Structure formats: structure tokens, C-alpha cells
Image: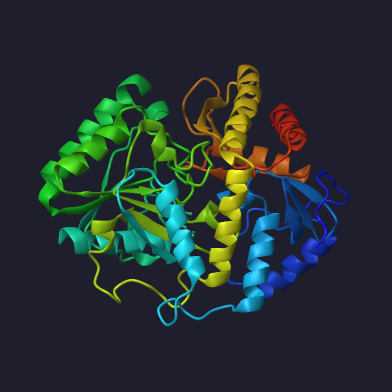
Amino acid sequence: MTAVPQERRVVTAIPGPKSQELQARRNATVAAGVGSVLPVFTTRAGGGIIEDVDGNRLIDFGSGIAVTSVGASAEAVVRRASAQLAEFTHSCFMVTPYEGYVEVCEQLAELTPGDHPKKSALFNSGAEAVENAVKIARAYTKRQAVVVFDHGYHGRTNLTMALTSKNMPYKNGFGPFAPEVYRVPVAYGYRWPSGPENAGAEASAQAIDMINKQIGADNVAAIIIEPVLGEGGFIEPAKGFLPAVARFAKDNGIVFVADEIQSGFCRTGQWFACEDEGIVPDLITTAKGIAGGLPLSAVTGRAEIMDAAHSGGLGGTYGGNPVACAGALGSIETMKELDLNAKARRIEEIMKARLTAIQEKYDIVGDIRGRGAMIAVELVKSGSKDPNPEATAALAKACHSVGLLVLTCGTYGNVLRFLPPLVIGEDLLNEGLDLLEDAFAGV
Ligand SMILES: *Cc1c(COP(=O)(O)O)cnc(C)c1O
């Protein structure tokens, strides 16, 4: 294995001729429903760089959607996963177990908020973790209703589509959806009618009122929320919102689930984003950043809740695959050794300073928000708060053409989001921000 040089390099159009050839083959055989943000075909990736088949090297502000926080070829992940591959690829934990799975659960118990006894169950994808959190909460409470929030995203399976807020592209035409799912307001400060300073108290009061009036607190098994809403636009619920909702859950015997699939594992400069307001969730779902790019997810929580499901009620053929568990142990080891929480906070400092300077020059930057290496700008039409998805798409395209991979998100498609690997060099980070600034000048 050779390390990818940590330098941007653009030697062809992006996508280049070889990527275009592969894209034609892809279009002939890969289902149209599976999209790609940028059809450059990857050959190598690591640190802050993605290399493509044409020899271009892109600066990575996406991390494969918040996954490769330790880089896409982190030494400890590669070493541990390779060693595990040579030993055995699979036995099925439900048939004959192995130590790696147990070690990952021990790490989750140590790293997640709260010092109560905790247990975990491992799965493959984020959606699967969320589905299992619902199963566990229903088994524990013997209730059925699930409460989720405006702008929330929880996955693409049937139940998680129902939990997800946005219709296009996630839900349109794919119903009917799972029943007993209820959506309530979230404290979206930038767009809250009476201003961000009132959003936390007002939105939590509205949400709680809706639960009481429309569902009945006694019928609610779980309240599920992302402590920083990811796909919905990197919305940090305004101060006071999360504690009020968590307290309401506690007072009413409702399982409070923090979906930290995108915000977890050092991404926001804490092991988990809910730590910022001192929230201790009953259950926490993790995936994305957990295993350095290998497919793994988990539900972790209070032992008495986690143990409510009967033996054999949870699991799956591949859940907690031994290679993925080895990858997770390598990833967690890297996060601790390199203090990636501190790195994430440093990335925030650099990014927010640069983005603030851009905002002073361009009034289409409505809001700058996020924490750690989970930072976004919300783009609006000049002199208003009207969403500006056209400028967002144009900016993303301009960045892509010069070798900076950025992603978009948001209910209104008007948020540029930045999720660099936490191991990105500061020179590359600054170069990426220079390119972004140039893109603003051009749009
Ligand atoms: C990505 C994501 C999911 C779904 O994870 P998959 O691995 O794509 O199934 C669920 N919740 C949140 C908050 C996410 O960001």
C-alpha cells in the first residue's frame, strides 16, 4: 500500500475521460436510482485526498458522508482489518461469537455519555441501527408510537423512510410507510419566526404539546432526534430544546434516542454531539464514523432497556462482522491517539473564521453553523431568507471543477456542508477554503 500524496492535482477535466468511460458503463448496468454527487471514479483515498482514475487528486470535504473521519486508509484500520481478514471473514456472531464484537461493545460503553451500565448490539448500516432502536424501545415500554422531528433524517428502509422528514429524494413514490410515526417541530434557529433566542423554548413547548394532544405521552415508545440534524441542513437545535425534550421523555417513561450516526465519533469535537448540552440519551445509534469506512453500526444504551428484547429478537447474518469490528477498533484507537476531538475543534475554528470573511463579502450566505468538522453555510437570495438552491448547486459545481469535493444538504437544498476527514492537513484545509472563496467570487 502506498500513501496518497497529500496534494491537490487537476490534470484533466473533472470528471476526466476515464471517469466518463466508466460512467457510461455504469449507466448501462447500475440502477438509475443510485446517484452519485460527483462521478469521478476513485482509485485511492487517504488523509484529505481522493485520487481518481484520470490521476486527479481532489481535496476531500465530504469523508464519504462523514464516514472516513480517520481517513479512508488509516494505518490502524488497514492493519487490524487486514489481520482479521486473514484469520476469518465471518462466522456469524449468532452462530459462534468472537472477541472483536465484544471489544467494540466495551468501547461503546466507555465512550458514550453516562456512567450507568450499558449494553450494545451491532448491525451493518445506520438505518438498521435506528430500526433496532425502535424495536428495543417498543419491547421495553410495551408502547408503539415513535416521535421524530421536522428536518430529521434516519435512513432509507421502510421504517426509517417513515421517520425521515424530506420527501424528495428519499420517500417519493416508495410508500406506504410504517405506521405510528409522528413528526413534531424542531428548534431551527435561523428560520424560527420569533428568532433563534426564542426557538428553543417555543419549539420544545410546541413539540411537547403536540405529543400530549395528538398522541398521548403514555403511548410513546421513543423520541428519536439527531443532536445536530445532518441531511436536514446541519441544524443545531437552538439552546434549551434538547434538554427540554429529554426531560419530557424522562418524566413520561419514553425512551430518548440520540441518532448520532452522522454527528458521533469526534465529528463535532466531542465523542458525541449530545454531550454539549449535557444530554445522556437512553439509547444512542452510531454508524458512519465508527469503523473508518467499513460497514458497522450500533445501538448502545441503558442495560435494562437493551436487555428488554428477548434472546434471538435482535441480530442479522452480518451484524458486527469481524472485519468491520477490527476496523472500528483501529478507528477508535486512531481517534484517541491523534486526539481527533481537538482536531475537529481546530477545523471549526479555521473554517468559521474563513466562512465569516466570505459572509461579509457575499450576502447570499444566510447562516454559518455547525460544530467541529461538521460545518455548513445556508444560502439565501440576496436581502432575504428565501432558500437559494440554485447558488448552492452552482457553488458545489464550481468547487468540483477545480478539485474540491463538497456536498450539499438541507430540506430546501440550499446548504453547502463540509465534512472533511479529521486528519486533513491544515494546508489542504486552507487550500480548500481558498477554492471555495474563489467559487463565491465566480457565482
Ligand atoms: C446516514 C444516516 C442514517 C442512515 O445510515 P445508513 O448507513 O445510510 O443506513 C441515519 N441517521 C443519520 C443521522 C444519518 O446521517
Tell me which corner region of the image, top left, top right, bottom left or bottom right, holds residue 433: top right
Identify the residue shown where x is 58% and y is 37%. 373
**1 horizontally vs 93: left or right:** right
Residue 327 placed where, x, y %?
59, 62
Q: Is residue 3 above or below residue 243?
A: below
**Horizontal arrangement in the rendering, residue 98 relative to residue 183 (left or right):** right
Instruction: Residue at 17%, 44% (x, y): give it.
Output: 211
112 shown above or below 377: below
How far from the left and from the top, in percent, is residue 294? 58, 63
Q: Is residue 195 visible?
A: no
On screen, residue 431 above or below 285: above
* Residue in the foreground of this view, choosing between 410 and 337: 337
Q: Which is more toward the observer, 102 or 140?
A: 102
Rendered image quadrant of residue 362: top right
Q: In the rendered view of the protein, which quadrant contains the C terminus?
A: top right
Whether residue 397 can be seen here: yes
| Residue shown at the point (66%, 43%) measured from the top left | 61
